Image: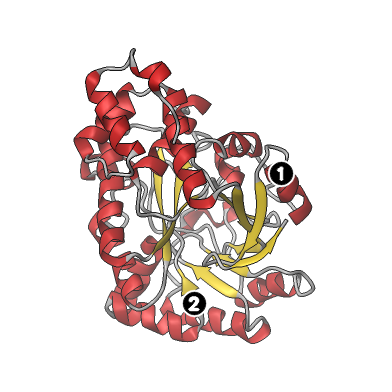
């Protein structure tokens, strides 16, 4: 147990009470969470988060070997923060891979030890449920043991709606084809007023949560995210995390939570200044403390950067995602730090071990493959 007596004297009584609950491994409520977020010095927040991280995982820091396939950046939706998507009418600025081209991306890594293919992209009006069932089936034919993590709730809601099937029916069809889990994208921010300002036309917060609850009910685990650092407030962040924590209490189907930093490059929200690294550290540490029923907090290094990811390993983070192989453009197009997001296993291991943590290769659902 960390001794906070040296700092407790300067803390307000309300914050000391919250800190004591956290140290005693008791759940904090939303009012207490707001006190913690607003009043805690960053050093204290980081220490509390690191204590939880080390109690659960010790020095272990997880990564996997994966590639991303992004079928298209053509999208029917108009998210204000997105630098990635293009309308069908602007095809000169877009890409649209054929199934053969996407399968070739898998074949290009035929001799590698990747254990996961992550498939997400724009919501294309002509790429529906049948199309992606066919794609997944072909992927599994050439790599039967690979885990397919695919489609945000936004993509899935559109697929199911177009195919006129329920969420459960659509997800079961994809599972039968070989899909193993869902990523956490598309959550953005759950507060309706804020969501309406930044991504009004995509699936609602309630639909996102229902999609993930349905996936969990048929044995498909998932991740969860938040888009932070734009026009949200601490109250809105806590509301978002509260809804996730409540669903996790119900299903226990989330593997990891990934805070995603808003990037202001080349989008309709470029007038909003990006948050500082201090804000990043606070967000991740707070998430580790509040989400007491989430086993993992992940820093998605292609988005937030390698150096910040290293710092976050002392602020509650125990997972940094995968090797990626330069196959994702979603954040590089928005001005992310890593414009060519690729690291091999040796580089990831060095990133982890150089700050005193133990690198552990995992599969998608956190079975340990190798400890370094």
Q: Is residue 103 above or below residue 351?
A: below
Instruction: Tell me: 213 left or right of 74.
Output: left
Residue under the point 28% across and 39% down: 238
Q: Is residue 279 above or below residue 350?
A: above
Front-most of 340 and 257?
A: 257
Residue under the point 47% across and 31% down: 47
Q: In which quadrant of the rendered image does the N terminus lie? A: top left
Residue found at the very far top of the displayed protein: 10
Residue 315 in the image, given as x and y percentages of width and height: 50, 36
Front-most of 301 and 163?
A: 301
Q: How busy is the neighbourhood of tag 2: few (under 14 within 10 Å), some, or many (20 plus)?
A: many
Residue 339 in the image, given as x and y percentages of width and height: 67, 42
Sequence-wise, the earlier of marks 2 and 1 is: 2
Residue 179: image tag: 2
Q: Is residue 83 above or below residue 359?
A: above
Q: Is residue 169 visible?
A: yes
Residue under the point 26% across and 37% down: 236
Front-most of 296 and 20?
A: 20
Residue 275 in the image, given as x and y percentages of width and height: 46, 27
Residue under the point 40% across and 65% down: 155
Instruction: Tell me: 68 left or right of 246.
Output: right
Front-most of 147 and 292?
A: 292
C-alpha gap between disc 2 and disc 1: 33 Å
Q: How busy is the neighbourhood of tag 1: few (under 14 within 10 Å), some, or many (20 plus)?
A: some
How many numbered discs sit on the rendered protein? 2
Residue 9 in the image, given as x and y percentages of width and height: 33, 14
Q: Helix, strand, or loop for circle 1?
A: helix
Q: Helix, strand, or loop for circle 2?
A: strand
Q: Nearer the viewer, mark 2 or mark 1?
A: 1
Residue under circle 1?
Answer: 353
């Amino acid at each position: 147990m960390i001794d906070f007596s040296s700092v407790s004297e300067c803390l307000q009584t309300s914050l000391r009470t919250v800190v004591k609950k956290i140290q005693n491994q008791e759940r904090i409520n939303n009012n207490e969470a707001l006190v913690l977020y607003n009043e805690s010095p960053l050093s204290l927040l980081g220490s509390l988060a690191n204590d939880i991280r080390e109690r659960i995982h010790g020095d272990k820091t997880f990564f996997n070997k994966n590639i991303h396939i992004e079928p298209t950046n053509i999208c029917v939706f108009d998210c204000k923060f997105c630098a990635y998507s293009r309308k069908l009418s602007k095809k000169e600025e877009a890409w649209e891979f054929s199934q053969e081209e996407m399968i070739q991306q898998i074949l290009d890594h035929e001799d590698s030890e990747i254990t996961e293919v992550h498939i997400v992209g724009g919501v294309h009006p002509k790429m529906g449920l049948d199309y992606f069932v066919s794609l997944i089936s072909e992927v599994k034919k050439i790599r039967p043991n690979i885990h397919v993590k695919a489609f945000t709730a936004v993509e899935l809601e559109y697929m199911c709606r177009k195919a006129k099937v329920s969420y459960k029916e659509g997800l079961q069809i994809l599972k039968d084809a070989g899909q193993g889990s869902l990523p956490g994208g598309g959550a953005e921010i759950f507060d309706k007023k804020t969501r309406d300002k930044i991504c009004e036309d995509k699936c609602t917060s309630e639909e996102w949560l229902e999609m993930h609850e349905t996936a969990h009910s048929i044995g498909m685990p998932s991740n969860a995210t938040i888009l932070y650092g734009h026009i949200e407030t601490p109250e809105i962040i806590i509301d978002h995390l509260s809804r996730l924590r409540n669903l996790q209490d119900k299903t226990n189907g989330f593997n990891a939570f990934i805070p995603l930093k808003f990037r202001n490059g080349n989008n309709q929200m470029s007038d909003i200044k990006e948050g500082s690294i201090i804000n990043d550290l606070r967000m991740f540490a707070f998430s580790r403390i509040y989400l007491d029923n989430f086993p993992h907090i992940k820093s998605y290094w292609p988005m937030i950067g390698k150096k910040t990811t290293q710092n976050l390993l002392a602020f509650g983070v125990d997972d940094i995602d995968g090797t990626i192989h330069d196959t994702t453009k979603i954040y590089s197009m928005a001005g992310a730090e890593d414009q060519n997001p690729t690291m091999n296993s040796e580089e990831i291991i060095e990133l982890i071990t150089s700050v005193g943590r133990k690198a552990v290769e995992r599969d998608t659902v956190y079975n340990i493959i190798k400890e370094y």
